Amino acid sequence: MIARSSTTGRIGLRDDALSACVSCGLCLPHCPTYRATGDERRSPRGRIALMRIVESGLAEPNAEWLAAMDTCIQCRGCEPACPSGVPFGELMADTQAFNSGTRRLPLRLRLGLRVLGRPQMLRLGTRLLALAQRMGFFRSSGFLPGRLPLRLPRRPAPAEVDVVLFTGCVMDTWTPHVHDAAQRVLEATGARVGRSGTAAGCCGALHVHAGLREEARSLAHRVMAALPGDQQVLADSAGCGAMLKEYGDLLGTEEAHAFSARVADVHEWLVERLDRLTPVGGRSEPVIIQDPCHLRHVQRVDGAMRAVLAPFVPVVELDDEGLCCGAGGAFAVLQPDLAAKVRDQKVAAIDRAVARSGAAVVVSANPGCSFYLGAAGYQVRHPLEVVAEGLAATGGQEMTDGN
């Protein structure tokens, strides 16, 4: 875990983390908000400069300062690009935790995060929204999938399990068919698969993004209590996987570090067992890969996703070096105009890939990315939905959409 020494300033940021930034600007092309605005206050080095001013007590965190921090998507695309290894994610998380203690968060964000931590409430709300969708009261806004499921079927768990599929909150209720696909692929390797279910619930990633660190810690304790033992915990959501892997830093205990060591992205686990997955017939139509930020920049296992897909479908790469799509958890809801500008950059890259390849499907391993790009008019699927359809173990049977 990162030592938390030398944090005597107002926000509580590590001195060495702040001083690591030399303002070289190599992060700028990888920052989606800077690319969209050209504003230094919307760049990593600009935000760090503003952090230093408040941390040292030279200025108060006024509205302009808060806007600079709130318009960070927290994609962490700047981290792999930084030659000095600035832990920008840590700096931003600490800053947002400080901000959440000095102001009241928007009501819709507070209500939304409260619901995510209460599985039964989330399921009830999802069913009501699904009914409203079918009655034509609203369309998908980019925050919701195009068609929410009305029912969540019960699935019996095996008596003994080899791995646990982390189902989380949003995916468990909004896109259960993705978990079904992931489980079918995992079982094709011979693994006995359990699910974390409502006992574990939400991972707390969006709470950390909002600066609600204590709420996130509470959720982390619940997840860990629900998943004792030594089985590997596999995540098919990039954001959830990144959060689970950072429980050690979040909680700072040996137990939390041990739990995080058990976590792997589902593609990361599968890539070591590809010899057990046999495609049916020839490879299908190409798919365009959209890298979720927390798979590429945080977990840095995007190569595993490509390796798992490669035997089943031709893979088409984007030419934007993994630039964020703009969804960013709740970012697209809280900053819709800026999020749309960021998405426009991704749309342009996808359209170029479509023109080059003729591909009609985009694959993304994160629900927020899938919803937001789906609202832009693309057919977006999880990579393991594509793999499940091509497996010999499925007998070629197509996956359903779970609705």
Image: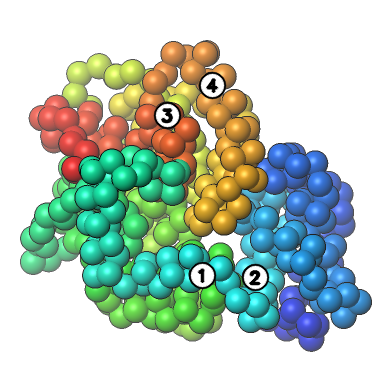
**Lower position in the chain sequence, tag 1 or tag 4:** 1
> Which x, y percent locates residue 3?
67, 79
**Lower position in the chain sequence, tag 1 or tag 2:** 2
> Which x, y percent locates residue 5?
73, 83
The disc placed on residue 107 is 1
- Give the residue type that dot 4 points to: Asp
Residue shown at the point (18%, 36%) measured from the top left:
400
Q: CA distance from mark 1 to mark 2?
A: 17 Å
User: What residue does disc 3 label?
Assistant: 378
Q: Nearer the viewer, residue 32 or 104?
A: 104
Judged by depth in the image, the label closer to the viewer, 1 or 4, is 1
The disc placed on residue 96 is 2
**Lower position in the chain sequence, tag 3 or tag 2:** 2
**Lower position in the chain sequence, tag 4 or tag 2:** 2
Residue shown at the point (35%, 36%) measured from the top left:
381
Asked if disc 3 and disc 2 are in contact, CB closer than 8 Å, the reply is: no
As displayed, is residue 314 above or below residue 35?
above
